[in-house]
Image (cartoon, rainbow, N blue to C red):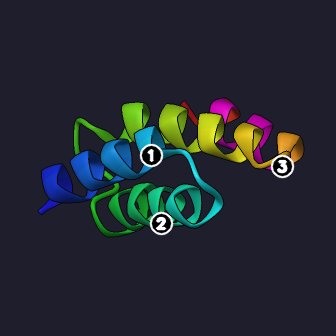
C-alpha cells in the first residue's frame, strides 16, 4: 500500500496543476503517516518538500527536508 501512495503522489506531482499538487501532497503525507518505517519515507518526504515548494509553502518544505 505504501508503494501505491508513493506512485500516485509521483503521478499527481507530474501533472502539476494546483489540484493535482494537492492530491500529491495528500498521497505523500498518507505514506509518511501510515507507514513511518517504510523504505520510501525519505523519498516521500523529499517529494512532499518539492510539492510544498511548488505551492509556495517554503517553510513547510524545509520542515519536510529536515525530517529526512
- Whether residue 67 is situated above or below residue 36 in the rendered picture: above
**What residue is disc 1 on?**
15
Q: Camera-side residue: 16 or 9?
A: 16
**What residue is disc 2 on?**
23
Distance in Å between CA atoms under marks 2 and 3? 15 Å
Discs 2, 1 touching: Cβ within 8 Å: no
Discs 2, 3 touching: Cβ within 8 Å: no
The residue positioned 65% from the left and 31% from the top of the image is 65
Q: Quick one: label 2 or label 3, which is nearer the N terminus?
A: 2
Magenta: predominant secondary structure element? helix
Q: Secondary structure at mark 1?
A: helix
User: x, y (%) of residue 44?
Assistant: 41, 41
* Location of residue 68 by image quarter: top right
Q: Secondary structure at mark 2?
A: helix
Q: Label 3 crowding class (10 Å Cα cut-off): few <14, some 14-19, many 20+? A: few
Taking the image as shown, residue 2 lies to the left or right of residue 51, namely: left
User: x, y (%) of residue 51?
Assistant: 61, 43
Q: Which mark is residue 57?
A: 3
Taking the image as shown, residue 52 lies to the left or right of residue 33, namely: right
Front: mark 2 or 1: 1
User: x, y (%) of residue 55?
Assistant: 76, 49
Is 64 inside the magenta-drawn segment?
A: yes
Is 61 inside the magenta-drawn segment?
A: yes
Q: Which mark is residue 45?
A: none
Q: Camera-side residue: 36 or 13?
A: 13
The residue positioned 44% from the left and 46% from the top of the image is 15
Q: Secondary structure at mark 3?
A: loop
Magenta residues, as a range?
Answer: 60-65
Quarter of the picture containing the N terminus is bottom left
Distance in Å between CA atoms under marks 2 and 1? 10 Å
Distance in Å between CA atoms under marks 3 and 1? 18 Å
- Whether residue 7 is situated above or below residue 50 in the rendered picture: below
Amino acid at each position: 500500500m505504501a508503494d501505491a501512495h508513493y506512485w500516485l503522489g509521483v503521478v499527481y506531482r507530474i501533472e502539476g496543476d494546483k489540484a493535482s499538487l494537492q492530491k500529491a501532497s495528500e498521497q505523500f503525507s498518507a505514506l509518511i503517516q501510515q507507514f513511518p518505517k517504510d523504505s520510501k519515507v525519505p523519498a516521500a518526504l523529499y517529494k512532499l518538500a518539492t510539492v510544498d515548494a511548488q505551492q509556495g509553502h517554503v517553510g513547510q518544505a524545509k520542515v519536510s527536508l529536515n525530517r529526512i
